[in-house]
Image (spheres, grey):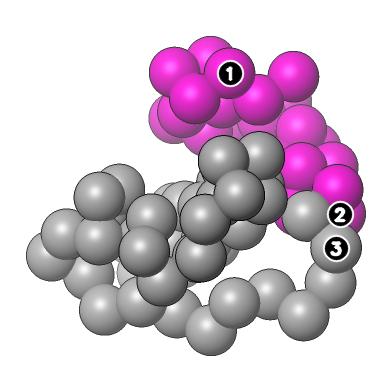
Amino acid sequence: MSELEQKVRRAAYTYLCHVKAHELQIQFDELWPAMCPKEPAPQVPDWPPDLSRNLLLGMRQQNEFIDALCAKYEID
């Protein structure tokens, strides 16, 4: 996997965690280890979770991995 693909996947997981933490009403830092236990937690995005959802939906159209991730975690 290229460095760019790794960065895109990490961004997708960050946005996903941002959205799901908001939906579940828990802290981003509490959810991150459940989703990516081997990765250090990134900074919480400083924009609303709806923007992270919209970013994921846009990324989903161009990337099969992100499409599958969105389907798994029910991001519509």
The numbered mark at residue 43 is none
- Residue 48: where, in percent of width, then height? 85, 63
Q: CA distance from mark 2 to mark 3?
A: 6 Å
Q: Earlier in the sequence, mark 2 or mark 1?
A: 2
Q: Please state the total of marks drawn on the protein image.
A: 3
Vertical side of 56 occupied by 65: above or below: above
Magenta part, dominant SS: helix
Residue 11 spot, x, y in % from top left: 54, 62
Q: Is residue 62 visible?
A: no
> Magenta span has 74?
yes
Please state the horizontal and vertical placement of residue 73, each as a whole percent of the image: 49, 25
Residues at circles 2 and 3 in contact by the CB criterion of under 8 Å? yes
| Residue 74, numbered label | 1
Label 2, residues with CA under 10 Å away: few <14, some 14-19, many ≥20 = some
The tag on residue 48 is 3
Which amino acid type is marked by label 1?
Answer: Glu
Mark toward the viewer: 2 or 3: 3
Nearest the camera: 26 or 72? 26
Question: Which SS class for mark 2?
Answer: helix
Amino acid type indicated by mark 2: Leu
> Residue 51 has which mark?
2
Magenta span includes 17: no
Q: Are marks 3 and 1 in contact (CB under 8 Å)?
A: no
> Going 68% across and 75% down the picture, which residue do you hit?
45
State the extent of the magenta-drawn residues as a range.
50-76
Residue 36 vs 76, above or below: the answer is below
Secondary structure category for the residue under label 3 = loop
